[in-house]
Image (spheres, rainbow, N blue to C red):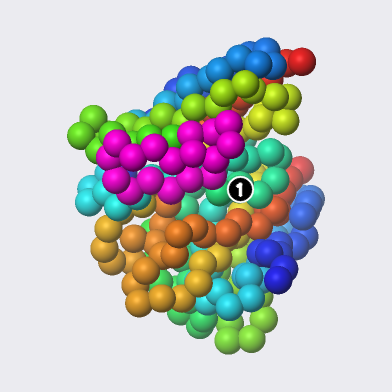
């Protein structure tokens, strides 16, 4: 049972380019979360998705950032027109479905490290 | 807004020492507190605490929650160099969509010297 898979692990983009980060949840998990970790800081919640639905995007910047979790395929976090301040580690996590329950844990991927030059 | 504060921000000890990491929180409708270990990759789950005063143990690590004073501690006894990592504390609130998001502290960077 593979864990949460993220790719690319490392991504370098020039200012103004687009960054696409992909996340495949653990098998059987239908809930996906994206977190951002800036240098010297803890993880900050960005968005929570279920298949084809954005449930909570309260942590997403209002512009340039979007996320999706299509019926087929991985979840994608898309950052348009990247700026240097977007340089960070982006972690995806997944959890199993349930009747409003969270499960004992959520499982994190290894992260995608975005560097904007 | 939910808030989690960890202290100290960083700690350097020698192998064999015992360390205590602190986590205080302010959260509306608290549900649980979680500890993670992060070693330059995916945070790995250590403990989930929901009830006050009940110690959770795993080997040399243990943790306890005080819901009255709104804090938790993570103890590591007989530290080893492999314990060097960032230790993250997170809280989860009850109810609604936000119940599925975790609010993290900024972490404690632990360095264990040989």
Query: Front-most of A97 and A15?
Result: A97
Instruction: Return the chain for callout 1.
Output: B
Pinpoint residue B82: horizontal percent, then vertical percent.
Answer: 72, 30
| Tag 1 secondary structure | strand
Q: A113 left or right of B19?
A: right
**Which quadrant of the rendered structure holds the C terminus of chain B?**
top right
Pinpoint residue A86: horizontal percent, then vertical percent.
Answer: 62, 47
State which quadrant residue A38 falls in.
Answer: top right
Is residue B59 visible to the viewer in this orientation of the structure?
yes
Region in magenta: B46-62
Q: Residue furthest bottom?
A: A71
Q: B69 left or right of B55?
A: left
Residue at 34 percent across and 72 percent down: it is A100
Q: B36 left or right of A76?
A: left
Is residue A65 visible to the viewer in this orientation of the structure?
no
Residue at 49 percent across and 58 percent down: it is A105
Pinpoint residue A95: horizontal percent, then vertical percent.
Answer: 51, 67
Where is B42 relative to A73, above or below?
A: above
Pinpoint residue B5: horizontal percent, then vertical percent.
Answer: 39, 31
**Which quadrant of the rendered structure holds the N terminus of chain B?**
top left
Residue at 61 percent across and 48 percent down: it is B44
Query: How many discs appear?
Result: 1
Residue at 54 percent across and 33 percent down: it is B61
Label 1 Cα neighbours within 10 Å, binned few <14 / some 14-19 / many ≥20: some
Which residue carries the number 1 mark? B44
State which quadrant residue A109 falls in.
Answer: bottom right
Any magenta on residue B4?
no
Where is B49 relative to B78, above or below?
A: below
Where is A72 relative to B25, above or below?
A: below
């Amino acid at each position: 049972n593979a864990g949460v898979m993220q790719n690319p692990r490392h991504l370098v983009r020039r200012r103004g380019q687009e960054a696409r980060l992909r996340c495949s949840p653990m098998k059987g998990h239908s809930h996906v979360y994206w977190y951002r970790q800036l240098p010297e800081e803890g993880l900050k919640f960005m968005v929570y998705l279920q298949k084809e639905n954005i449930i909570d995007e309260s942590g997403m910047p209002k512009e340039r950032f979007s996320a999706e979790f299509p019926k087929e395929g991985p979840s994608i976090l898309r950052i348009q027109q990247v700026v240097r301040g977007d340089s960070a580690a982006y972690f995806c996590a997944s959890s199993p479905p349930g009747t409003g329950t969270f499960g004992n844990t959520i499982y994190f991927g290894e992260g995608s490290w975005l560097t904007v030059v | 807004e939910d808030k989690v504060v960890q202290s100290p921000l960083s700690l350097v000890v020698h192998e064999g020492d015992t360390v205590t990491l602190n986590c205080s929180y302010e959260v509306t409708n608290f549900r649980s507190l979680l500890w993670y270990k992060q070693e330059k990759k995916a945070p790995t789950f250590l403990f989930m605490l929901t009830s006050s005063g009940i110690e959770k143990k795993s080997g040399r690590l243990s943790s306890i929650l005080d819901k009255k004073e709104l804090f938790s501690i993570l103890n590591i006894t007989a530290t080893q160099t492999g314990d060097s990592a960032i230790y993250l504390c997170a809280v989860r609130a009850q109810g609604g969509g936000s119940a599925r998001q975790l609010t993290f502290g900024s972490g404690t960077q632990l360095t264990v010297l040989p």
